[in-house]
Image (cartoon, rainbow, N blue to C red):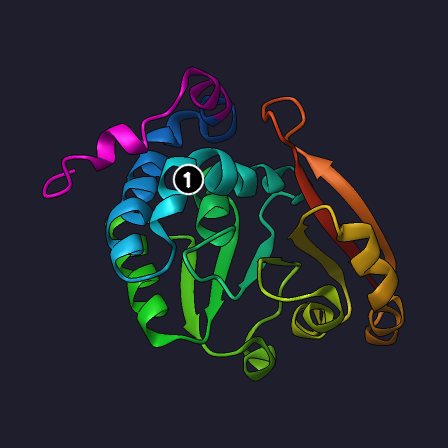
């Protein structure tokens, strides 16, 4: 990218990543590549992610998030809580133009960056909303609430489940501690209306390391 001579080589897709990216993004792969360049340049410069993450943007971040689209029904309204650098929200919006995404982010500088990227990519299925999840409950009625690296499930349940207004699913991207987090959060989830909570993996067919998701069914 202009002004960033070393970035192209750092974020270039490996053969394995390219196969996965083509399967996940199809003809929208150029948009995904442009998003990755934003992450590696202005995203890093503005502190949305650290320089050590740049070589891992595709495998650890963008593809890891985009495969979650497999769990979302067509034309769903999705609220991405604590969207930060747009993960998973922007990755989902690129992979699934049928989805209606609202990116919920409390920090102004992150909202400015997200808005710039949305405009540059021409994503007409994305709204950036500044605020904390608990402050925007009355402004959002989502079918799906997503989150990644926001907080432990005991706290995250209270930030996401209310956005569904009684019906839908929470998809929280988690790591190896997913089952343990579910156990700790079980009472909170039930109190908030969660009917069934499970750990699912997605991306098994295309990713070397599939994505672990805690799925909470509500209503």
User: Can you give x and y, in whole percent of width and height, for residue 60 in the image?
Assistant: 51, 39
Q: Quadrant of the C terminus?
A: bottom right
**Residue drawn at point x = 70 percent, y = 74 percent:** 162
Is residue 88 at all visible to an observer of this figure? yes
Q: Residue at 53%, 40% (x, y): give it.
A: 66
Q: Which residue extends farthest front?
A: 52
Badge 1: residue crowd in 10 Å (few <14, some 14–19, many ≥20):
many
State which quadrant residue 114 falls in: bottom left
Whether residue 96 appears in this view of the structure is: no
Tell me which corner region of the image, top left, top right, bottom left or bottom right, holds residue 186.
Answer: bottom right
First to last magenta residue range: 1-20
Q: Is residue 135 above or below residue 205?
A: below
In this image, 131 relative to 147: left or right? left
**14 or 68: which is nearer to us?**
14
Most extreme residue toward the top is: 15
- Say whether residue 150 is left or right of residue 182: left
The quarter of the rendered structure image containing the N terminus is: top left
**Observer-nearest of 49 and 137:** 49
Residue 206 counted in the magenta span: no
Q: Nearer the viewer, residue 163 or 154?
A: 154
Q: At 67% across and 51% down in the image, what residue appears?
A: 174
Query: Count of labels shown?
Result: 1
Helix, strand or loop at mark 1: helix
Q: Which residue is mark 1?
A: 57
On the image, the x and y values in percent for residue 98 come to 51, 44
- Residue 24 as seen in the image, left or right of residue 54: right
Residue occupying the point 35% across, 67% down: 110
């Amino acid at each position: 990218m202009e002004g960033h001579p070393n970035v192209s080589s750092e974020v270039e897709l490996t053969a394995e990543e390219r196969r996965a990216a083509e399967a996940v993004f199809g003809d929208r792969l150029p948009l995904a590549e442009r998003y990755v360049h934003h992450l590696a340049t202005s995203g890093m410069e503005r502190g949305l992610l650290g320089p050590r993450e740049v070589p891992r943007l595709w495998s650890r971040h963008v593809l890891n998030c985009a495969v979650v689209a497999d769990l979302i029904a067509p034309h769903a309204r999705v609220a991405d809580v604590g969207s930060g650098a747009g993960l998973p929200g922007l990755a989902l919006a690129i992979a699934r133009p049928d989805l209606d995404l609202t990116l919920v982010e409390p920090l102004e500088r992150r909202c400015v960056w997200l808005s710039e990227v949305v405009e540059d990519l021409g994503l007409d299925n994305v709204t950036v909303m500044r605020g904390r999840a608990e402050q925007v409950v009355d402004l959002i009625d989502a079918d799906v609430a997503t989150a990644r690296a926001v907080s432990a499930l005991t706290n995250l349940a209270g930030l996401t489940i209310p956005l569904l207004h009684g019906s839908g699913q929470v998809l929280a991207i988690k790591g190896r501690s997913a089952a343990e987090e579910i156990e700790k959060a079980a009472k909170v989830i039930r109190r908030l209306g969660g009917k069934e909570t499970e750990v699912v993996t997605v991306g098994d067919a295309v990713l070397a390391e599939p994505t672990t998701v805690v799925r909470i069914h509500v209503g």
